[in-house]
Amino acid sequence: MTIHAANFHELRLDRLSRDFGTHNALKDVSLTIKKGEFIALLGPSGCGKSTTLNLIAGLLPATGGGIWLDDKRIDPLRPEERGFGMVFQNYALFPHMNVRRNIGFGLKMRGLPKAEIDKRVDEAAALVRLQSQVDKLPGQLSGGQQQRVAIARAIVVEPPLVLMDEPLSNLDAKLRLEMRAEIRRIHNTLGATTIYVTHDQEEALSLADRIVVMRDGEVRQVGVPEDLFSRPDHLDVAEFMGFRNVVAGRVTSVDGGVAQVAVGSASVTGRVRGAVTAGVACHVAIRPEDLNPSSEGGLKATIISTEFRGREFVGFARMQDGTDLSFLAHTKLEPGTSVTLGADPDRVLVFGGGAA
Amino acid sequence: MVADTRLSTKLWAAANWAVIGFFLLNLLAMIATVVTSSFATRWLGTWFPAGWTTRWYSAAWAEFQLDEVLSVTFQIVFLVVLLSGLIGVPAAYALARREFPGKRLVMLLFLLPLLVPPITFGIPLATVLYRTGLAGSMSGVVLANLVPTVPFVILVMIPFIEQIDTKIEAAARVFGANTFKLFVHVLLPLLMPGILASLLLVLVRTIAMFELTFLTAGPTSQTLVVALYYAVFAAGVRAVQSIDAMAVVYMVTTLIWLVIALRFVNPTQIVGRGGRR
Amino acid sequence: MSAVPDTIPLKQRLAARGVDGLTLLVLPAVLFLLALFVYPFLYGLVLSFNPKNGGALANYIKFFSDSFLYGTIATTLWLALPVTFLTLLFAVPIAFRVRLLQHQRLLTTLLVIPITLGTVLVAQGLLNYLGPQGWFNRTLLTLGLISTPIKLLHNYWGVVISLVITGFPFTFLLTLSYLSGIDPALERAAATLGAGPWQRFKTIMFPLLLPGLAITFCLSFVQAFSVFPSAVLLGAPAGPTRVISIAAYQAAFEEYDYSMASAVAMIMGVVQLGIVVLVLSARGLLYRGPAGGGKG
């Protein structure tokens, strides 16, 4: 009854939906995940990423669609029959059991002999570097150690799929970096398939083989980190990926994937994303670090303030129509002075469907 | 929390609901019996009374001198609520904000009157009150009732006060508030929801407190619940409908305050007797 | 105090230990309880050793040599223990069920009613409801489950039923509040690790609930053990439900032997305390930390 197949080929979500009353938490999500992949579900809170994870784990029943492991439909199965490993946001360690019993819990539930359980718990504890802590209660461990126990507990059963629900969100910044590397190392060591939910794009970019960006219960874009980072398909994905300057404009011409956009009296050149034709309203998105004071023309704005950031200054400026821009400068600029800001056309994205 | 659709699970759930349904059904039927009887002209050996009347209420009102009993009840309850607030809230504040030697002992002192049932400590307490001549009077009843309510207010208020950031008080002091102003302008408004909740609970508990009032009350200091006990105890002397009418008056008095209290507190808090870990 | 020169003033030394003006706010409450709780208790204890006639232990000797008196302990235990176990047995599974509900408020409100109304009203209600002509017997007769009305009043069962009606909601609400203190993620974690419903209950939820259940047991037991009005009104106070509080009350207010009454009250307290200490020391062997799944 339990799925023993650590060797499956792919996990398929087929038009998966979940309603809470009248609220659609998840709308027709389809996704295929290959064995061995590290997939990140990325999005702001309420985007449906945790719902997706809970549906895969079986902790929530789906209200539409199906989940398939190769040709086996698993969404009618109860969580205990799916045999996946899951790492919870607050770790969910059993507080009354010591580390050894916590890690061994899944093996015990599978009815393995005690000697086998002990052996595999020791291996798992060694993998997460907690050999010396196995007799302690979770309450006696630090946050990072608790996190390792939670990971060991999930992977010791050699699950076909490891599900992680914002596992690092309760750790401080330094520990978060450390555990990030640790999670990737463990993934590589075991060759397990991992689905990782996070709202932190840096975490997703650094960990995942592929990222699934979600918003409002829908998948917005799926791609490798490099693609998402430099070529987001949607404006909201771009914003999520750090394109913090968004300026409304009108396309004047399009030529081979490059568009000229009129923003007020200025003109900006950028790469076209999606369907853009001459004459339509559009949005131009630029990362602050790609926007600099320029003598060759560009967006005109008035300086509000500049902040010293060590190697350079971060400037804040406002355009005539009230749009705020942030940019990078090498010199300090006085508030109230005018500035012209330009960017490398290769680093400027033009999205159709603007309101200008 | 975990989805489960097996037949055995469903049967088990159904069994649970059946038990709770049976319990509630009997509870409501029991209350309905009292209410029905209080409006019955004659009710013997049938499903429903022969006819309906409200005269038992006027009869009960006169027979049991309910106007006096009610006025005594509310005077006692009002005094208990007021005094347990005045004694309990400052003590809770001190306990929430200070660590001092012997604090555990003090906490134990406040826990015991809630753990020991009233009838157990009520008998020696009543003995002392009789020896000092306080028993039988209203002040004796109030004093006896304060024994569990003061600790109750303290134990409800401590966690409530603890969750108020001490920095707020520090800030008020920095901006020049003296202790009195701090209390009136900062603490009281912040504590008000907690005080209100705990005092409403005290009110409901005191109206229903039978044992302590029973052991210490004299003829002129009976509360409604004690008067009801004597009426039931001496049943046969008076028409049962008359006693039921009195019971309905008692129920309405209690439930009105319960409904008000439930606007501010969770039902589980009513059973909370400081049984925290 | 001021004999030692060059020391920090007493006020400051006390303040450093946490004793200052604010701490003194606790005093009225402490004094009040010392005067009206501790003192009466000690007074009663001393009084119980100063009987009307006979030596210091006369009251206790009398109690334990008169089956009409010492028998009340067994009578009370025979009521309190089954009722406590019974209510717990029903409360636990139902609390597990109700915890999953979105809208528990209606149910918990309904259940709080019998507690709020108190034992006297429940007794009055049951006198009518459970009587030979009451709705309960009528329904059973109509359904053909019985041929003659069952006697549920003025005997053991009348008291048991009234104790269950006030005791079950109490036990249930307390259990529910302990159960809500357990992080639901723990149960989900156990499920993803392959534990079925029974295993989740046995290995995770029950062990974590047990310390709370021990407290619930103590509180429910102590309440049932001090049963008074319903034992008089619904039971047979001269015989099968002559509970210990009736013995104490009669000594005090019918025989006006306050010394004997105090002795009975002390014995009552010792039995209650004995059971509570027993349960709580067993609880000491259990895991008692927070029932959360980790930090945060």
Image: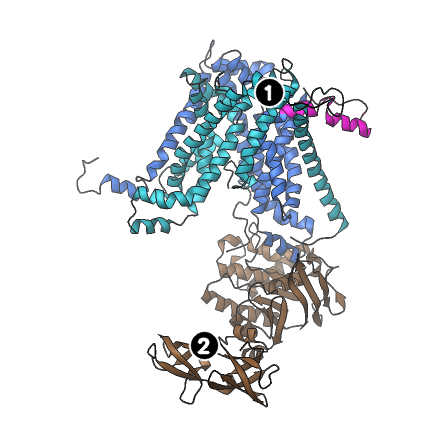
Chain colours: A brown, B cyan, C blue
Mark 2 and mark 1: Cα distance apart in space: 79 Å
Q: In this view, does C45 lie above or below B203?
A: above
The chain letter under disc 1 is B
Question: Residue beneath label 2, please?
Answer: A321
Q: Can I make out residue B88 in this image?
A: yes
Please name whichever residue, A129 or C117, is drawn nearer the observer in this view of the structure. C117
Task: State left or right for residue C291 relative to residue B191.
Answer: right
Q: What percent of the width, then of the height, locates residue C260?
A: 50, 15
Q: What percent of the width, then of the height, locates residue C196?
A: 69, 52
Q: Does the magenta stretch include residue C136?
A: yes
Q: In which quarter of the image is the N terminus of chain C?
A: top left
Q: Can I make out residue C244 in this image?
A: no
Inspect the image, locate mark 1, and give the three-letter code of the amino acid beneath it.
Ser
- Residue B100 placement: quadrant: top left
Q: In this view, does C255 lie above or below A50?
A: above
Please name whichever residue, A214 or A40, is drawn nearer the observer in this view of the structure. A214
Please tell me if label 2 and label 1 are on a single chain.
no
Q: In this view, does A15 lie above or below B155?
A: below
Question: Residue beneath label 1, please?
Answer: B58
Q: What stretch is highlighted in magenta?
A: C123-151
Inspect the image, locate mark 2, and give the three-letter code of the amino acid beneath it.
Asp
Q: Is residue C143 magenta?
A: yes
- Residue B17 placement: quadrant: top right
Q: Which residue is drawn at 29% across and 42% down?
A: C15
Q: How many marks?
A: 2
The chain letter under disc 2 is A
Secondary element under disc 2, as helix, strand or loop, is: loop
Secondary element under disc 1, as helix, strand or loop, is: helix
